[in-house]
Amino acid sequence: MRCPKCGEEYDNNDRFCTACGSPIAAAGRAEEKIGRQEPEGRGLIGYSPLINDPAFARYMKNTKIWSLAFAAVLAVVAIGGFYIYGETSAEMDNPEALLIGLAIGGMFLLIAVFQTIGRARSTTWDGVVVDKKIEKKRRKRHSGDDHYWQNYQLYTVSIKKDNGKMHFLSTEDDDTVYNYYKVGDKVRHHKGLNSIEKYDKSGDTMIFCSACASLNDIKDDTCFRCSCPLLK
């Protein structure tokens, strides 16, 4: 390296220039630091502190509101539809038709309430991916009075939680989640959210949004769908 004052070459261990006597250690260390490259992907290792961003709290609040509102609309449609059916059809009269509509509408509301309670009662936990499995399956499907067999593949990622219990991520005919996680990956599930954060994302090109579970490019900072920060 060269002295920033007189241009004379010096050794990296020298603290003063041997030609002009100027202090050079600080300059040398600065040049050395600038020339040193950070390991690729270093910033993608570790659980992200962005989970504390207010956007996640807003997302969970809006999800609760929309879930209950959508269930209420379905309930009104079911009740109104069966009431009209009971008034106009010769096959069923009111109040029998209305009672069926009330039962179906109540079911929609109960499902939304239980989903909301489930999200509120969920906890943050850590775990490790311990197994991945692909299974060829088939199920019986009915078409009118006939039936047929439908073949499909079941992809399962098995996660052992820190409390010893197992958590499974399963998808049919879609290996995206299966390929995203590797055996040995440390992961974290955040309370109230839909996806699981990996500890080490340094080798990834894509990342799941921990709020809505949409798949995003690892270079993006926010989710294209819900605008929540990507945990990286």
Image (cartoon, helix red, strand yellow):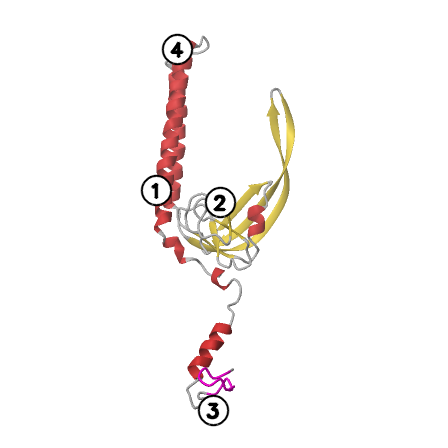
Question: Which sits earlier in the primary sequence, circle 4 or circle 3?
Answer: 3
x%, y% of residue 78? 41, 22
Alpha-carbon span between mark 4 and mark 3: 105 Å
Residue 17 x %, y %: 46, 89
Q: Which residue is mark 1?
A: 61
Spatial CA distance of label 2 from label 1 is 18 Å
Q: Residue placed at 41% from the left, 33% from the top?
A: 111
Mark 3 surroundings: few (<14), some (14-19) or many (≥20) residues within 10 A: few
Question: From mark 4 to mark 2, how far is it between C-alphas?
Answer: 45 Å
- Which residue lies under the disc numbered 4? 87
Closer to the chain start, of discs 4 and 1, is 1
- Residue 214 appears at what percent x and percent y? 49, 45
Q: Which residue is mark 2?
A: 214
Mark 1: amino acid? Lys
Question: Which SS class for mark 1?
Answer: helix
> Mark 2 belongs to which amino acid?
Ser
